[in-house]
Image: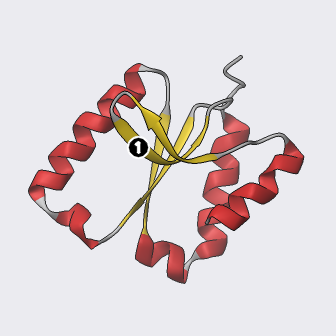
Amino acid sequence: MWGWLRTLRKEGFHFRRQAPFHGYFLDFVCLSRKLVIELDGPSRGEEAQRRHDAIRDEVLEREGFTVLRIQNRTMDTHMPSVVDAIYDALRDRPPAW
């Protein structure tokens, strides 16, 4: 994922990985478009983890971010669709500044 996201710099989309934000670490974030990409593994199905993620998403959404959650297995088997979804989300969001 990181390799693909880095190629978007030529189109003006700069991502950071493991970026700290309000006590959380964001897997990937494009600050100029306020887009967060979270890669979720099998533990995300557990109730405690879902509650934690919901609170985190609320914090991010209050700050104007959109969160895309992508399952690892989806990324492994449908990467072209994942890439399309990320690119669409970037294009649909106006620059934050």
User: Picture quarter containing residue 89?
Assistant: top right
Question: At x 70% / y 66%, what residue is drawn?
Answer: 3
- Other residues around mark 1 within 10 Å, as few (<14) / some (14–19) / many (≥20): few
Q: Is residue 23 left or right of residue 33?
A: left
Image: 49 above or below 41: above
Q: Quadrant of the N terminus?
A: bottom right
User: Picture quarter containing residue 92?
Assistant: top right
Residue projecting furthest to the bottom: 77
Question: At x 26% / y 45%, what residue is drawn?
Answer: 53
Residue 81 image offset from top left, x and y in percent = 62, 68
Mark 1 element type: strand
Q: Is residue 48 left or right of residue 93?
A: left
Q: Is residue 51 left or right of residue 54?
A: left
Image: 58 above or below 14: above
Question: At x 52% / y 80%, what residue is drawn?
Answer: 76
Residue highlighted by disc 1: 25
Q: Nearer the viewer, residue 26 or 83?
A: 26
Question: At x 44% / y 20%, what residue is drawn?
Answer: 63
Please name the amino acid that badge 1 sits on: Phe
